Image: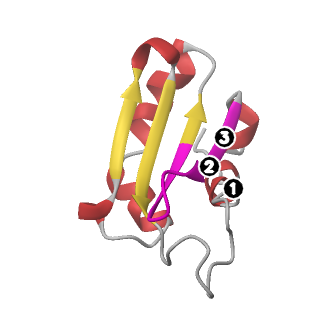
Amino acid sequence: MQLGELVTNVRSKNAGPYWVTIDVFCGSEAVFNRLSELLTREYVATLYQRPIDTLKRFELTELHVLKFSFPRPVVQGSRFDRDMHGAQYSVLLSEIELPL
């Protein structure tokens, strides 16, 4: 099963011109607890090929949401920016295969 099939929504967006944020809306406490164990800083940093010391992880327990933020590879709107709004970063995370 892919992560996107288990959760309510996975979205990404700019968090200013230098950062991107990925939100994982788990939808329930059980899914939130499971993904809290699986989606570690180390795992997400490796997945997005970012240094672990630049990746931030937030748990919004009451909302059953996990958030990850990291610096964009290029500044938003720069000549080499391939995702002006940061919206495509969520696809990689939503398509990962979860262990049974």
What residue sits right under mark 1 in the picture? Answer: 87
Amino acid type, label 3: Val
Determine the image quadrant of residue 24. Answer: top right
At 41% across and 18% down in the image, what residue appears? 61
78 or 88, which lies in front? 78
Residue 99 percent coordinates (x, y): 57, 44
At 70% across and 54% down in the image, what residue appears? 95
- Real-space Cα separation, disc 2 to disc 3, in angstroms: 7 Å
**Up-down relation of residue 34 to residue 1 (above or below):** above
Whether the residues at callouts 2 and 1 have beta carbons within 8 Å, the answer is: yes
What residue sits right under mark 3 in the picture? Answer: 10
Residue 83 percent coordinates (x, y): 68, 69
**Up-down relation of residue 75 to residue 23 (above or below):** below
78 or 58, which lies in front? 78
Quick one: label 3, few (<14), some, or many (20+) residues within 10 Å?
many
**Up-down relation of residue 73 to residue 35 (above or below):** below
What residue sits right under mark 2 in the picture? Answer: 12
Residue 50 percent coordinates (x, y): 39, 70
Determine the image quadrant of residue 31. Answer: top right
Whether the residues at callouts 2 and 3 have beta carbons within 8 Å, the answer is: yes
Label 1 sits on a secondary structure element that is: loop
At 49% across and 63% down in the image, what residue appears? 17
Amino acid type, label 2: Ser
What's the magenta region? 9-22
Determine the image quadrant of residue 79. Answer: bottom right
What kind of colouring is applied to the model shown? secondary structure
* Front tag of 2 and 3: 2
